[in-house]
Image (spheres, rainbow, N blue to C red):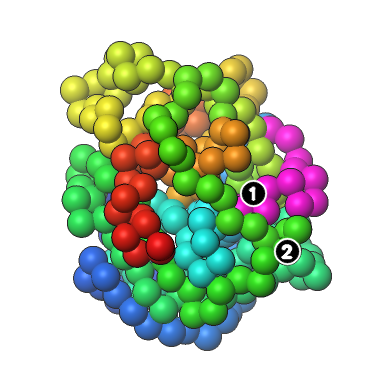
Amino acid sequence: MTRRAWLAGLSLMGLLGCGGSVDDAGLASPSVESTAQEILGGSVAARHQLPYQVRIMVQGVFTCGGTLTKAGWVVTAAHCVEGIAPSAIRVIAGDLLLSTLEADEQVRLVVRKVVHPSYVALEALHDVALLQLAQPFNLSAAVQPLALPVGPAPLGLHTASGWGATQTGPTSNALKYTSLRVVGPANCQALVGSGHVPSAQLCATPPNINTNVCQRDDGGPLVWGGRLYGILSWHGSSRCDTFSVFANVFTYVPWIQSYTG
């Protein structure tokens, strides 16, 4: 979403679940899911190609993507879960087709939500949150955690993923992925403006106008070399035809590991 749309969405999130503190805990029962629009263009993922990709459901509504970083922990964007009780959230892994209950698919309840203590919604900064699962996922070829980075994000093409559609078309039934080009801090500053904080944010641009991440890809991964470098935070345009901004995961590794180990 754009920064402006994000702010409007915060009010909606408040309606989807009761307010919570920075660190909340609770349980919920599974419920029926719906789908939403995401990756523009892109390619359909092969089975087991993106085993770290999860989708986040809030009271049965598909709201965001996320990344499995430990069998019992998911990393996502703070704005995806801010103000939402853990009892309203569930996480689905091993999923490829939205319309089909697949043999690889697993569902977990969330018992704890941790929003980064420096998260600033109005400035779209430190947009990172952790979800602790009631029970760790059973790891398999379809469900695998993704490693955290050990250095800054390299410039160049990275992989972003989600369940996608064209901007105005129907939701894709299949998990999709696309390539985005991470640009340097100076170029990111030129795109974002004075609000850019290099330690907290990465900017990525699509290689062409036919593919990009879009609404409700939010919270999903930006990956290079088998490591998670970005968490999708917001988009430079409501049409999803320009740059996107990701939380810079390398900055948050110590904080993440202080909870997940």
Q: Quadrant of the N terminus?
A: top left
Identify the element where label 1 is drawn: strand
Mark 1 residue type: Trp
Crowding at label 2, few (<14), some or many (≥20) Cα neighbours within 10 Å?
Answer: few
Q: Find residue 84 and report its horizontal and vertical position in percent.
A: 34, 69
Q: Position of residue 140 (x, y in %)?
A: 73, 63
Question: In whole angstroms, how far apart are the C-alphas of marks 2 and 1?
Answer: 21 Å
Rendered view: 140 above or below 252: below
Between discs 2 and 1, the one toward the N terminus: 2
Residue 120 image position (x, y, % from top left): 20, 48
Seen in the picture, residue 234 relative to 137 is either above or below; the reply is: above
Q: Nearer the viewer, residue 159 or 69?
A: 69
Q: Give left or right: position of 148 versus 180.
A: left
> Can residue 37 be seen in the rendering of this structure?
no
Q: Residue at point 46% right, 40% down?
A: 149
Residue 135 within the segment the image draws in magenta: no
Q: Nearer the viewer, residue 64 or 136?
A: 136
Q: Who's the residue at 59% across and 18% down the image?
A: 207
Q: Quadrant of residue 230?
A: top left
Q: What amino acid is at disc 2? A: Ser
- Magenta includes 48? yes
Within 10 angstroms of label 1, few (less than 14), some, or many (20 or more) residues? many
Label 2 vs label 1, nearer the camera: 2
Residue range highlighted in magenta: 42-53
Which residue corresponds to the image point at 37% horizontal and 57% vertical from the top-left?
257
Q: Residue 140 has which mark?
A: 2
Q: Dot 2: what SS?
A: loop
Q: Quadrant of residue 169 in the image?
A: top right
Q: Which mark is residue 163?
A: 1
